Image: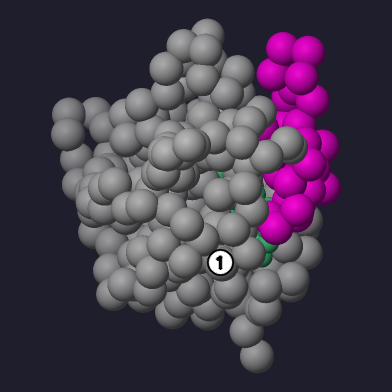
Amino acid sequence: MYPDNDEYRLIFNQRAGSYHQAMIDCPFARDPEFQAMAEFAAVMPGDRVCDMPSGGGYLNRFLDPDADIISIETSYEFASLAPPRGNRNILLCEFDNIPLASDSIDKIICLAALHHVIDKQPFFNEAFRIIKPGGTLCLADVQKGSGIVDFLDIFVDQHNSMGHQGHYLDENSGTELQNAGFSPVAAVSKDYGWRFDSLPEMGRFCKMLFGIDQAGEDVVLEGIRNYLGTGQDGRIWYMNWGLYFLKAEKPARTGT
Ligand SMILES: C[S@@+](CC[C@H](N)C(=O)[O-])C[C@H]1O[C@@H](n2cnc3c(N)ncnc32)[C@H](O)[C@@H]1O
């Protein structure tokens, strides 16, 4: 039995603490991923942007400081862990019921979340509602058929007592976006590394981030080596990672 949509939301209420601790202990590990997302989304000063789900608000420091960033979370635990940005509290809601006005947002960024959501269509529909005409939805997530799938659905699944079975971005994702009304703008796979000062740090980070409660750091490191591969550049250790980036635009209104 694998977790379903709602179970994943509840699982993140339990996993949030160790996920957030991993991000605090190694705050720069995923910088290449956040940089890739920020570059892809191209947030401009004055943009009104939703980072959804924001986890602990890790992407904030990569986005234009003069943009209005609204952090949105679906898990109460994550929402309570995240530091408020300025005087703005994090918004807690469901993917398909976002308490924001229609046509009010320039960009929605959704990083590393949708593989936990079986039916993505209600989120795409709701995103389309709140985005302004001419605004964009920017997604980055694991792509079906990529090497990361086996790491998550075999290795993590085997060693996380809550299991892991993802629902990855694939050829249907573009169709679902179009069904919501979006026009596809870009689709690209980006490979990069997560970076660490040492191999034990890499094992510890992944054990906490992926909620691996049934294996020690050494076994986790072995899993990373076998399924993903690692490398070294000077004093920095990398583990191979990469996501599929999709951008879709809400067409500008034309005519009368
Ligand atoms: C891997 S975290 C990503 C957080 C952040 N974007 C990041 O890159 O660190 C996955 C997020 O998706 C949310 N989530 C996972 N499954 C969900 C589901 N089925 N419904 C709603 N939210 C879900 C969790 O609350 C969590 O914030």
**Disc 1 on helix, strand or loop?**
loop
Spot occupied by residue 191 in the image (x, y as percentages of width and height) = 23, 49
Say whether residue 120 is magenta: no
Say whether residue 72 is magenta: yes
The quadrant where residue 192 appears:
top left
What residue is rendered at 76% in x and 19% in y?
A: 88
Residue 214 visible in the shown view: no
Spot occupied by residue 80 in the image (x, y as percentages of width and height) = 82, 37
Q: Which residue is mark 1?
A: 120
What residue is rendered at 48% in x and 37% in y?
A: 256
Q: Nearer the viewer, residue 255 or 42?
A: 255
**In this rendering, would 43 be left or right of 213?**
left
Spot occupied by residue 44 in the image (x, y as percentages of width and height) = 42, 17
Please state the extent of the stretch shown in magenta in the rendering.
71-99
Q: Is mark 1 within 8 Å of ligand 1?
A: no
**In this rendering, would 36 be left or right of 155?**
left
Majority secondary structure of the magenta segment? loop
Quadrant for the N terminus in the image: bottom right
What residue is rendered at 31% in x and 72% in y?
A: 171
Q: Amino acid at mark 1?
A: Lys
Label 1 neighbour load within 10 Å: few <14, some 14-19, many 20+: some
Which residue ends up furthest to the front in the rendered image?
256
